[in-house]
Image (tube, rainbow, N blue to C red):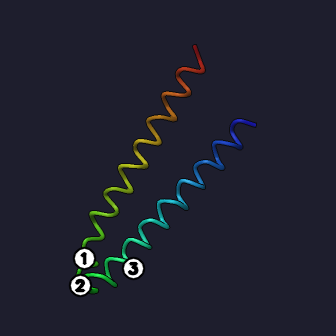
Amino acid sequence: MREMRRQGERKFLWMVVMTLVVLGLVLIGLVYGWTAVLTAPCLLGRAGTLWLLFYLLEKLQKRLEER
């Protein structure tokens, strides 16, 4: 049961991150011009940071449950 919930949370996180990246790129393109979309590496870097934070919190949760 918990594993299914975690899988659902991971899928939800990926959907949120991808939505933020895509919407962020579209908004940047509309507001600042499409050449400004070259900031995509910054957006992807932030998405990677969110993923890393989620991953580390999940590992911490598993470690605390084992105690």
Amino acid residing under circle 2: Thr
- Quarter where residue 1 is shown: top right
Tell me what residue is drawn at x 64 percent, y 47 percent. Answer: 7
Q: Amino acid type of disc 1?
A: Leu
Q: Earlier in the sequence, mark 3 or mark 1?
A: 3
Q: Which mark is residue 26?
A: 3
Q: Looking at the image, which residue is at 59% across and 55% down?
A: 12
Specify whether 47 is left or right of 34: right
Gap in angstroms between the C-alphas marked 1 and 2? 6 Å
- The front one of 18 and 33 is 33
Q: Disc 1, disc 2: CB below 8 Å?
A: yes
Q: Amino acid at mark 3?
A: Val
How far from the left and from the top, in percent, is residue 2?
Answer: 70, 35
Disc 2 marks which residue?
Answer: 35
Left or right? Give the position of 6 relative to 54. Answer: right
Q: Residue furthest front?
A: 31
Q: Residues within 10 Å of mark 2 (few under 14, many from 20)?
A: few
